[in-house]
Image (cartoon, rainbow, N blue to C red):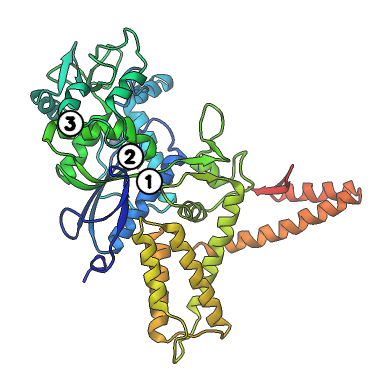
Amino acid sequence: MPIYKDQQIRLFNSLTGKKETFQPIEDGYVGMYVCGPTVYSNVHLGNVRTFMSFDMIFRYLRHLGYKVRYVRNITDAGHLENDADVGEDKITKKARLEQIEPMEVVQRYTVDFHNILNIFNFLPPSIEPTATGHIIEQIELISTIIENGFAYEINGSVYFDVHKFDETNEYGKLSKRKLDDLIHNTRELDGQSDKKNPQDFALWKKAEPEHIMRWPSPWSDGFPGWHLECTAMSTKYLGEQFDIHGGGMDLKFPHHECEIAQNEAAKGKSPVNYWMHANMLELNGQRMSKSTGNTVNPDELLSGNNKFFSKAYAPSVIRFFIAQSSYRSVLDLTDDGLLASEKGFYRLMEGLNILDNIKASEKSTLDINAWKQKCYDAMNDDFNSPILIAHLFEAVKYINQIKEGLASVNEEDLLTLKQTIHIFIFDVLGLENTTKTESGTDKLTGAVDILIKLRQDARANKDFALSDKIRDELADVGIQLKDGKDGTTFSSS
Ligand SMILES: [Zn+2]
């Protein structure tokens, strides 16, 4: 019998603002769509967090025995720089700046995206469709929306008529916005648009002569609006109504709101039963942003080659750090936070190694089955990974008690303990046991910390010759000391 028969998930539905019992449309099957990246630059760490949350959800659903079709798209056309449907296509702009073909931009950053996700041990989605591969489906969808009276064509472009839609449907139900308030708050962009109303959004844009990415359509040579691709691809692969639609919090409006409107306008039904949104990732208490310089790329974080962090962190440590907070909370990425997660992660790995050598006893003094159910309860409660991790640390405590002879488990409980801990650490959280390579690093950290301490003593005694010697000789073997206001840290190359 599949595990999901015994484990009932409750998840937070952004549409209703409540935790709801998860009931897939078809028993045993789950359709899940997550908005993928726009491939015009290296993947953002905030996006990595979002995709990691849904990777964990995908992993847990699979573990429970659901047959999951997980669709995550690649946006390789049509995403304009401005949500008001003006500005250049992000990919075209990058291609122009670098003097290469738009599809070279797409290829380069799709490869980068997959590389980073592989480093973080992501499972591939079941289908990874591209916007450019589904132009025909998008044109058909536009035709249907026009036929149903919810879109209009002007000068070769087609716009969704939000006001008309709102007469019979409810625009803004996901993001809890009212059209009246939107009208009040929309900035008019004089002369930049043919739209009847500023709230309307593009389904098809006529291409300017210099625009390279273009396709023929009944209205003009042009390209689809960004919101459209997700409606076309999600319903193509998951059906007109499906179970879960996920994405970053920043996509709730207008992107997901527009997806709902398009689907209701074309098919007469709301596409998604459970909308899930992963929250933002901040860096040192502030929004990550290229323009303020408060940003770090995934590979800079992994290599330690950045100005924010004292050292390089292993991919599983970063994954563990992210899992230590609920996907619905804002997560603040800090050096202290990563250092603490690193300690915790290796404590967990050490527990696993001890567990390998533990022998069963006649009798159990621990209730392993109750502990196991607590792990499931945590994940069943809206995928509460921080609570799950607290239970995993509880297991490390058990393991140490057993090792010290303060507790015991019988054969069956020992097997349950081993299996459950492996399931949650590796299959569900997607961590990898990196003790072997990293224990070397840990010893190195210990040794360098001793030298840093000796150097501090030398400086306190005004023995600068010795303190410089320690610094220089460490540099010779590739270890750089960095003096900061919070003490000395090091990086190794
Ligand atoms: Zn999308």
Q: Name which residue lies at 41% across and 49% down.
A: 327
Residue that lies at the very extreme toward the bottom in this rendered image: 362
Tag 3 and tag 1, C-beta contact below 8 Å: no
Residue behind label 3 places its C-beta within 8 angstroms of ligand 1: no
Q: Name which residue lies at 35% across and 26% down.
A: 91
Mark 3 vs mark 1: in front: 3
Type of amino acid under label 1: Phe
Residue behind label 2 places its C-beta within 8 angstroms of ligand 1: yes
Tag 1 and tag 2, C-beta contact below 8 Å: yes
Q: Is residue 471 visible?
A: yes
Q: Residue 184, relative to residue 17: is it above or below? A: above
Secondary element at tag 3: loop
Q: Is residue 133 visible?
A: no
Tell me the residue that label 2 is attached to. 36
Type of amino acid under label 3: Asn
Secondary element at tag 1: helix
Q: Residue 401, relative to residue 37: is it above or below? A: below
Label 1 vs label 2: CA separation? 8 Å
Tell me the residue that label 1 is attached to. 51
Tell me the residue that label 3 is attached to. 169
Residue that lies at the very extreme toward the top in this rendered image: 191
Secondary element at tag 2: loop
Left or right of residue 426: residue 24: left
